Image (spheres, rainbow, N blue to C red):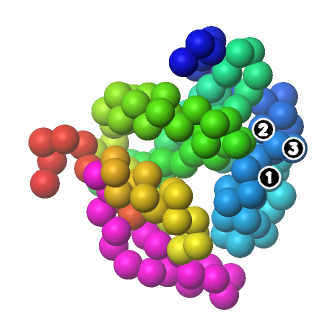
Amino acid sequence: MGVDVRIVPARGKHCRSIGRRMRESDRLEVQRSGRLGPVEALRQSMRNSDAFTVLIDGRPEIMYGVGDLDVLAGVGGAWLLGTDAITENWRWFLRATAEGLPGLFTRHRVLRNVVDRDNTASLRWLKWLGAEFLGDIDIHGHPFVLFEMRKRGDV
């Protein structure tokens, strides 16, 4: 790929950098789901989870994390937001997310969240990762899809 990729703990300055350049599909999704701007959505997600930033050639491009939804049941809320670097580096992104997915299950057996029904690229990616789609949910008058992923070996 020819680029330097590092994963570091998420920081507030990463929220500003990624939020200002957030890809359109992610920007629309956070606006529709929580009526927040991109920077504040990243800050809120970072505060409520174990969050990491992907630096590509030293620049923050992707932030992701997992927060607790139901500790006793082992359910976490997984999320990922980023810039157009995801599309520009899609081969790396697919490989890295597939390889990194098992590492997100350190505290949870099930990861769950919603995705904007219009976010077709994210829906395809989640399906490719093995997500199960559980049905539609209306959030602020817009359709979202509830999905979950289970730790390998769990049924």
Q: Is residue 55 left or right of residue 107?
A: right
Where is residue 74 drawn, in percent x and y?
32, 48
Q: Are marks 2 and 1 in contact (CB under 8 Å)?
A: yes
Which residue is labeled 1 in the image?
38
- Residue 18's label in the rendered image is 2
Residue at figure coordinates x 43%, y 58% from the top left: 124
Q: Is residue 52 left or right of residue 14?
A: left
Circles 3 and 2 in contact, beta carbons < 8 Å: yes
Q: Which residues are magenta?
A: 130-146
Magenta residues, dominant SS class? strand
Residue 22 is inside the magenta segment: no
Q: Quadrant of residue 37?
A: bottom right
Residue 112 appears in the figure: no
Q: Earlier in the sequence, mark 1 or mark 3?
A: 3
Q: Name the quadrant containing residue 21.
A: top right
Q: Amino acid at mark 1?
A: Pro
